[in-house]
Amino acid sequence: MDLTPDELLTTTRAVRKRLDLSRPVEPELIEECVAIALQAPNGGNRAPAHFVVVTEKEKREAMAEIFRKSAKPVLERVLASIQSGSGDAAADERERRQYESYAYHSEHFHEIPALVVPCVKGRSEGASVASQASRWGSVFPAMWSFMLAGRARGLGMTFTTIHLSHEEEAARVLGIPYREVMQAGMLPVAHFKGRGFRRAYRQPASELIHWEGW
C-alpha cells in the first residue's frame, strides 16, 4: 500500500470487525512482517523476540477458547460501565462501539486465519523495573513493527494481551516451554475489508506532554 510514514503510523489501528475471515493469510506475508519486526530496537542488540505462528484449525480453536475465557470478565466490566453511564454522551458512545468491537472479535476469534504469538526467552516475575523494562522493551517494539509492516501489506490485526491471564494453558496448546519462555501477547492477523482507516480518537498531545518534569 502506498502510505506515507505519517499515514502508516496514524492509521495502524486495532482491527476486529473488518477482518476478512474467509481469506487465508499468505505465509510469505507473515515472514516478511517478521523479518521487518526483527529490525526493531531491542536490549543489547540481541534480537530476543520469537514468533509462534498458528494457522492450524484445531490450535486456532483452542486458542480462541482461551481468549474467550480470558476476555469474559473484561467484557463484563465494560458492559457494566456502559450500563451505568458516565454522563459524557460522546465517551459513552465510544465505549459502546468499543464493546461491540470486543464482543464481535471474541465471538469470531476461532475464524481468524492466523494468530501470531510473540515470545521472549526468560521470565520476568519478581525482576526489577529496570530488568522488566529491558525485557519487554525488546519485544514490544517488534510487535508494533510487525503491525506496521502488516498494515503496509493490507493486513489488519489487534495488539492484545488478554489471553495472558491463561498463559500457561496457551503454552501447553502451542508447545511453548512455559518456565523458559514468556508470551508477550497475541496478534490475530487477517486481510482487512474496506479501503483504509482513519485516525483513532486520542487526547490532544498538549494534555499529555510534561515539559521539564511531571
Image: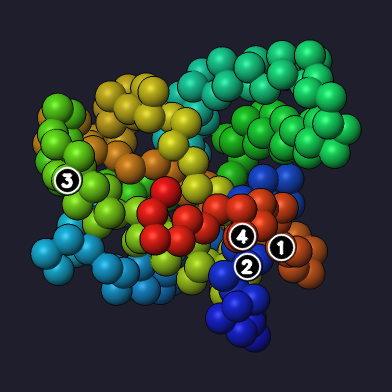
Cα separation between marks 1 and 4: 17 Å
Residue labelled with disc 1 = 199
Residue labelled with disc 4 = 206
Q: Where, by quadrant of the figure, is residue 174 drawn?
A: top left
Circle 3 crowding by C-alpha within 10 Å: few under 14, some 14–19, many from 20: few
Question: Which one is earlier in the sequence, the residue at label 2 or at label 4?
Answer: 2
Q: Closer to the observer: label 2 or label 3?
A: 3
What percent of the width, then of the height, locates residue 9? 57, 70
- Taking the image as drawn, is residue 86 in sight? yes
Circle 2 crowding by C-alpha within 10 Å: few under 14, some 14–19, many from 20: few
Q: Which quadrant does the N terminus fall into?
A: bottom right
Q: In the picture shown, does residue 34 fall above or below 130?
A: below
Question: Which one is earlier in the sequence, the residue at label 3 or at label 4?
Answer: 3
Q: Mark 4 and mark 1 in contact (Cβ < 8 Å)?
A: no
Residue labelled with disc 2 = 10
Cα separation between marks 1 and 2: 6 Å
Cα separation between marks 3 and 4: 28 Å
Cα separation between marks 3 and 1: 33 Å
Q: In the picture shown, does residue 78 fall above or below 140?
A: above
Q: Report helix, strand or loop for mark 2.
A: helix
Q: Mark 2 and mark 1 in contact (Cβ < 8 Å)?
A: yes
Q: Report helix, strand or loop for mark 3.
A: helix
Mark 2: which amino acid?
Thr
Task: Find residue 130 and name its label.
Answer: 3
Q: Report helix, strand or loop for mark 4.
A: helix
From this viewpoint, which residue is outermost toward the right? 89
Mark 3: which amino acid?
Ala
Circle 4 crowding by C-alpha within 10 Å: few under 14, some 14–19, many from 20: few
Question: Which one is earlier in the sequence, the residue at label 3 or at label 1?
Answer: 3
Q: Mark 1 and mark 3 in contact (Cβ < 8 Å)?
A: no
